[in-house]
Image (spheres, coloured by chain):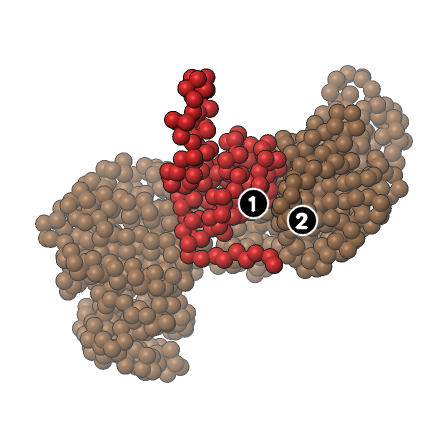
C-alpha cells in the first residue's frame, strides 16, 4: 500500500523553522527541477534537491533523515539557476543546522589516533564533525 | 447666502435611531440656514419637490441634504438643484445613514449627536461652495493608431468603419506585425497568413485610414482633443506608385543579409519586398546595407538599371508629416525574449537550438514544400524561456508559449509521426477557450509532455546534437536525452521601441515593463493620460483573440470620447490662487500626470490634463494651490465643525472617494458598529490631505486623525498613496517635536472589502484618543506655530 503523508500542525512548525533558519521563502518553489538538473552531486543523493524542497514545503521532518543535505557541496549551481530566486543550498544548510543543534556526536575526537590527527587537514576534520553529527 | 437643510428619515432607517426632528431644529439655528426640515423620504418625488419648491419660495442658494451616502443618491439631488436653476455643485450631503444611524444601533443619543455634527459639517462646507461650471471642450473625430500589428490593424479598421479619421503609423515597411510570421494559430489551427492577409488588405482600401508605413512617430504634444503629431517617413528609395514588385531588382541586387521576417534563417537582398503578402506590397531598399547608399558615388546601382518602371530613387529623403488628432491608440506590441540572455540554453552558440518563432517559419516553409532545413528525429521544446524566471528579470508568465508549443509540437508530430517530440514544462497553462482540449489533442498525437525545467544543455562537438539534462519532477528521476533540434519557447518582453512613445504621451509602466492601464479591472484599455488607449501586447503578454478584443475595446473607448463632438470634463480640478503663488515650481514634479507648468512666474494648470487628485497641494509651501470642490478653506471649515463642541477625543477620518468612503458605506450597510466619536470627511484622494490640514485639525482639538486611501495599485490616482504616506510621516515628526504622541495620526491604504479592518482601526484610534485624552492647550498652540513656520521652512 502506498504510504500516506499526514500533514499536521507539527508539519507547519517544521516548515516555519526551516524558513526562519534559511531565510528563504520555501513555499515559493514551484517544483520545476532546475536545481536537480544543475546539481553535480545528484548521483550520490537519495532524494533530489527539488524533492527535498517539496518535503520541506509539506513540513515532512523526514527531510532530516535524507542523505541529500549532507551530500550537498554548497556549490550554489542550484542557487544561480533557480528561476524563483531561491537559495536551495541555504535550505540544505538549515536542515543541517537543525540536526547539529541536537548535539549528538558520532565522531569522538579521542578515538582518532594521534598520528592521523596530526596528518588530517583541519578543514577535513571540521567537515567530518559536521557530517557525522546528528 | 440662504441655505436649506433637509434631514431624511429614510423610512425609519435613520429616524429609528436618530432624532431627526432634533437635528433639523438644531441645524436650523445655524448661520445662513433659512429653512431646515425633516421628511420621510427625501429621494421620493415628493421629497424632491419639497426642495425644488423651497429653492423658489425661499430663494435658496445652497442645499444640504442629510440622508444616505452621496455615492447612492448624490446624483438625484444634484439633478433637483439643476432643474431648479441652481448649480448642482451647490449641494452638500451629510451621510447620516451609512456613516451614522446604521453604525450606532441602540445608541440614539450618540447617533443624534453625531448626525447633528455631520449635518453641521455639511453646512460649514456648503457656505464655501462655489458653482462649478461643467467644463466641455470640442472634440473631433481624428485618431492616431501607433503600430500596425494585428492590434493596430483591428483598432484602425474598427475606427475607420465607424467613420473616424484614422492615421495608422507603422515603423517597418509593412503592416502585419508578428502575426504575419506565424504558421497557424492555436487552438483552431487556422493558417495565420490566410486569416490576417485580408484584414491587412482592408487597411489601405478603407477610405478613412491614412496608412503610413516605414514611418515613426517622432513627437506628440498636446492633450485629448488636440494631440499635435509629427511623423517621420523614412525613405524607401523606391517609388511605391511605380513599383510592381516584379522582382527583377531583387534578382540583380548583390547584397544578401539575414531576413528579419524569416527570423534570420534565410537571406534577403538589400532591395526587397518585406514578405509575400506585405502591405504595401512594394520594394524597399535597406539603406544600412545597400552598396550605393552606404558607399555613395556611382557604386552598384544595378537595381536602378534593371527596373523596367523607373521606380528606384536613390535621392529619396526622410519626410516629415504633421497632423492633429483627438485621441491616440498605442499598439506598439512586444519583442520576443532575447534567448542569448539565457546562456545555459546555448542559443546563438549551438546550431541546433532555435526559438519558437524560428520554428514557426520552418513550419511555414515546410508546409509550402520549400523546407529551410530538414526537421528530423528527436525534437525538444523548452518552456518558460525568458518567462517566470527571475534570473533574467522576468517574473511574469507570457501566456502564449504553452499553447504555441502545444501547437508546433503536434503539427510536427502529426505531419511526420516518426518524429519524437518532447515538451519540457514547469506548469502547463491552457486557460483559454478550447485550449485544454487542444493540449489533449497534442497528447493524443503522441507529443510527450515532461514536467521539469531543463537545467543544462550540452552540444556534441561532432554531431552537433544537443543533450538536455532535466529532472522529471513527477517521477523524481533525472533524465538525460539527446535531441536533434531544441526549440526554446521564448516569451514576450516589453519592446524598447515603445519607450519614446510612452515618454511623449506620459504613460506609466507596470513592474513587468509593459505599459500600465488606468485601472486593472474597470479601465483595462485606458491610460492615465486622458484620450490615450492601449491595445494588444504593449499592455502585457496576450494571445491573438485577447489582442483583437482589446483593440476593439480601445477603439470603442476612443469613440466614446469623440462621438459627441463635445467632451465633458470633471469640474474637480486643481486651481491656483495667483496672488499667493511665488512660482517656486515645487508643484511641477509633484503632479503625477504632468499637468503643471510654470508660466510667467506663476503656476499654470492644464485643466484638460488635471485628474483632480489634489496630490500637488501638499507640495505647495504657500497654500497657493487648491482644488475645486474640496478647497483648503472648505476642508478646514468641515474640520472645525466636526470638532466644535467636542472634548478633544474626536477622531477625524479622511476617506478617499474611490475606496475608503465606499468602504465606510459598506461597513454601514453591513450594520457594523463602531465608536461614535468618529467623523468621516470625504476627499478625492488620501494625497489631497495636506500635513498642514492634519496639524490644523490637531490644533483645533482633534484627538486622532486617520487618512484612508486606495491601495496604490488599485488607486485611480498615481502617487496619491505615496504622498499620503509622506504627509503622515511629516505630521508624525511634527507631533513628536511638540511632544504629542505620533500614534495619534495614522495613514492606511485600504481596499473596499476590508470592513472589519476599517472598524478595528477606527475603534483603535478612538480608544487611543480616549486613553491619551485631549491634546493640551499649550501644545495645540505650539502646533499652530509649527504649521506657520516649521512646516513651510522644511519644504524649502
The residue that disc 1 covers is: A51
- The hue of chain B in the figure is brown
Residue B229 placed where, x, y %?
59, 41
Residue B483, quarter of picture: top right
Query: Does residue B431 show up?
Result: yes
Residue B603, quarter of picture: top left
Q: Alpha carbon of mark 1 to alpha carbon of mark 2: how far?
A: 24 Å
Q: Quadrant of the N terminus of chain B?
A: bottom left
Circle 2 crowding by C-alpha within 10 Å: few under 14, some 14–19, many from 20? many
Task: Point out which mark residue B663 bears.
Answer: none
Q: Quadrant of the C terminus of chain B?
A: top left
Position of residue B723 in the picture relative to residue B26 (left or right): right
Tell which subunit mark 2 falls on: B
- Compared to residue A32, the image places residue B34 above or below, namely below
Tell which subunit mark 1 falls on: A
The residue that disc 2 covers is: B402
Residue at the location (47% across, 43% down)? A64
Figure chain in red: A
In-front residue for pair B519/B475: B475
Residue at the location (21% across, 72% down)? B110
Residue B758 placed where, x, y %?
33, 61
Residue B329 placed where, x, y %?
60, 49
In-front residue for pair B343/B514: B343
Residue B419 placed where, x, y %?
82, 44
Position of residue B471 in the picture relative to residue B362 (left or right): left
Residue at the location (15% across, 45% down)? B739
Amino acid at each position: 500500500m502506498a504510504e500516506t503523508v499526514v500533514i499536521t500542525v507539527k508539519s507547519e512548525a517544521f516548515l516555519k523553522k526551516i524558513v526562519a533558519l534559511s531565510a528563504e521563502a520555501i513555499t515559493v518553489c514551484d517544483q520545476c527541477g532546475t536545481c536537480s538538473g544543475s546539481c553535480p552531486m545528484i548521483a550520490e543523493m537519495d532524494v533530489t534537491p527539488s524533492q527535498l524542497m517539496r518535503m520541506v514545503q509539506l513540513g515532512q521532518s523526514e527531510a532530516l533523515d535524507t542523505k541529500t543535505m549532507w551530500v550537498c557541496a554548497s556549490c550554489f549551481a542550484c542557487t544561480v539557476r533557480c528561476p524563483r530566486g531561491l537559495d536551495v543550498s541555504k535550505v540544505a544548510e538549515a536542515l543541517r543546522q537543525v540536526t547539529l543543534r541536537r548535539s549528538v556526536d558520532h565522531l569522538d575526537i579521542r578515538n582518532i589516533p594521534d598520528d592521523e590527527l596530526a596528518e588530517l587537514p583541519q578543514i577535513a576534520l571540521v567537515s567530518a564533525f559536521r557530517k557525522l553529527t546528528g | 447666502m440662504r441655505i436649506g437643510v433637509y434631514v431624511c428619515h429614510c423610512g425609519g432607517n435613520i429616524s429609528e435611531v436618530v432624532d431627526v426632528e432634533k437635528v433639523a431644529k438644531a441645524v436650523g439655528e445655524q448661520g445662513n440656514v433659512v429653512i431646515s426640515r425633516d421628511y420621510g423620504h427625501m429621494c421620493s418625488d415628493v421629497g424632491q419637490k419639497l426642495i425644488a419648491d423651497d429653492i423658489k419660495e425661499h430663494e435658496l442658494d445652497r442645499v444640504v441634504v442629510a440622508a444616505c451616502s452621496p455615492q447612492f443618491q448624490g446624483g438625484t439631488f444634484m439633478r433637483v438643484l439643476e432643474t431648479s436653476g441652481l448649480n448642482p455643485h451647490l449641494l452638500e450631503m451629510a451621510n447620516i445613514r451609512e456613516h451614522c444611524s446604521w453604525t450606532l444601533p441602540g445608541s440614539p443619543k450618540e447617533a443624534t449627536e453625531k448626525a447633528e455634527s455631520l449635518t453641521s459639517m455639511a453646512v460649514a462646507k456648503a457656505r464655501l461652495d462655489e458653482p462649478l461650471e461643467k467644463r466641455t471642450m470640442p472634440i473631433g473625430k481624428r485618431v492616431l493608431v501607433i503600430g500596425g500589428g494585428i492590434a493596430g490593424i483591428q483598432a484602425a479598421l474598427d475606427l475607420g468603419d465607424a467613420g473616424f479619421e484614422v492615421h495608422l503609423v507603422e515603423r517597418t515597411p509593412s503592416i502585419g506585425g508578428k502575426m504575419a510570421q506565424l504558421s497557424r494559430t492555436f487552438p483552431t489551427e487556422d493558417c495565420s497568413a490566410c486569416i490576417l492577409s485580408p484584414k491587412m488588405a482592408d487597411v489601405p482600401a478603407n477610405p478613412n485610414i491614412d496608412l503610413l508605413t516605414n514611418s515613426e512617430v517622432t513627437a506628440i504634444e498636446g492633450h485629448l482633443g488636440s494631440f499635435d503629431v509629427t511623423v517621420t517617413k523614412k525613405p524607401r528609395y523606391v517609388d511605391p506608385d511605380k513599383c510592381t514588385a516584379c522582382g527583377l531588382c531583387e534578382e540583380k541586387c548583390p547584397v544578401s543579409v539575414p531576413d528579419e521576417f524569416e527570423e534570420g534563417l534565410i537571406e534577403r537582398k538589400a532591395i526587397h519586398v518585406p514578405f509575400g503578402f506585405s502591405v504595401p506590397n512594394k520594394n524597399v531598399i535597406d539603406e544600412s546595407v545597400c552598396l550605393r547608399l552606404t558607399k555613395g558615388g556611382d557604386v552598384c546601382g544595378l537595381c536602378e538599371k534593371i527596373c523596367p518602371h523607373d521606380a528606384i530613387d536613390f535621392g529619396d529623403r526622410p519626410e516629415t508629416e504633421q497632423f492633429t488628432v483627438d485621441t491616440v491608440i498605442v499598439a506598439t506590441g512586444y519583442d520576443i525574449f532575447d534567448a542569448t540572455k539565457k546562456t545555459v540554453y546555448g542559443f546563438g552558440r549551438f546550431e541546433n537550438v532555435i526559438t519558437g518563432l524560428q520554428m514557426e517559419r520552418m513550419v511555414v516553409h515546410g508546409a509550402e514544400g520549400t523546407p529551410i532545413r530538414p526537421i528530423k528525429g528527436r525534437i525538444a521544446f523548452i518552456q518558460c524561456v525568458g518567462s517566470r524566471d527571475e534570473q533574467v528579470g522576468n517574473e511574469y508568465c507570457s501566456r502564449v508559449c504553452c499553447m504555441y508549443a502545444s501547437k508546433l509540437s503536434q503539427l510536427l508530430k502529426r505531419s511526420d509521426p516518426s518524429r519524437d517530440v518532447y515538451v519540457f514544462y514547469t506548469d502547463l497553462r491552457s486557460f483559454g477557450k478550447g485550449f485544454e482540449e487542444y493540449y489533449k489533442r497534442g497528447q493524443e498525437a503522441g507529443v510527450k509532455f515532461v514536467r521539469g525545467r531543463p537545467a543544462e544543455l550540452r552540444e556534441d562537438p561532432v554531431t552537433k546534437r544537443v543533450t538536455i539534462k532535466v529532472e522529471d519532477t513527477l517521477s523524481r528521476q533525472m533524465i538525460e536525452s539527446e535531441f536533434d533540434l531544441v526549440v526554446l519557447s521564448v516569451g514576450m518582453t516589453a519592446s524598447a521601441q515603445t519607450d519614446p512613445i510612452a515618454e511623449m504621451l506620459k504613460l506609466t509602466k507596470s513592474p513587468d515593463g509593459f505599459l500600465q492601464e488606468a485601472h486593472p479591472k474597470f479601465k483595462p484599455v485606458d491610460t492615465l493620460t486622458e484620450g490615450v488607449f492601449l491595445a494588444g501586447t504593449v499592455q502585457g503578454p496576450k494571445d491573438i483573440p485577447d489582442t483583437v478584443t482589446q483593440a476593439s475595446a480601445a477603439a470603442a473607448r476612443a469613440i466614446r470620447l469623440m462621438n459627441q463632438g463635445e467632451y465633458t470634463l470633471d469640474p474637480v480640478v486643481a486651481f491656483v490662487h495667483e496672488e499667493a503663488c511665488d512660482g517656486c515650481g515645487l508643484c511641477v514634479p509633484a503632479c503625477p500626470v504632468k499637468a503643471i507648468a510654470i508660466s510667467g512666474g506663476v503656476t499654470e494648470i492644464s485643466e484638460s490634463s488635471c485628474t483632480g487628485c489634489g496630490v500637488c497641494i501638499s507640495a505647495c509651501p504657500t497654500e497657493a494651490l487648491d482644488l475645486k470642490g474640496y478647497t483648503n478653506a472648505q476642508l478646514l471649515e468641515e474640520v472645525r465643525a466636526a470638532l466644535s463642541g467636542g472634548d478633544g477625543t474626536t477622531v477625524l477620518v479622511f476617506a478617499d472617494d474611490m475606496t475608503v468612503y465606499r468602504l465606510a458605506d459598506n461597513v454601514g450597510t453591513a450594520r457594523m458598529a463602531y465608536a461614535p466619536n468618529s467623523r468621516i470627511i470625504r476627499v478625492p484622494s488620501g494625497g489631497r490631505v495636506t500635513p498642514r490640514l492634519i496639524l490644523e485639525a490637531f490644533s483645533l482639538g482633534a484627538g486622532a486623525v486617520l487618512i484612508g486611501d486606495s491601495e496604490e495599485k488599485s488607486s485611480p490616482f498615481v502617487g496619491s498613496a505615496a504622498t499620503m504616506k509622506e504627509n503622515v510621516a511629516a505630521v508624525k515628526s511634527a507631533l513628536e517635536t511638540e511632544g504629542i504622541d505620533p500614534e495619534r495620526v495614522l495613514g492606511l491604504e485600504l481596499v473596499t472589502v476590508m470592513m472589519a479592518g476599517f472598524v478595528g482601526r477606527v475603534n483603535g484610534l478612538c480608544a487611543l484618543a480616549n486613553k491619551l485624552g485631549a491634546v493640551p492647550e499649550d501644545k495645540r498652540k505650539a502646533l499652530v506655530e509649527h504649521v506657520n513656520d516649521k512646516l513651510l521652512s522644511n519644504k524649502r
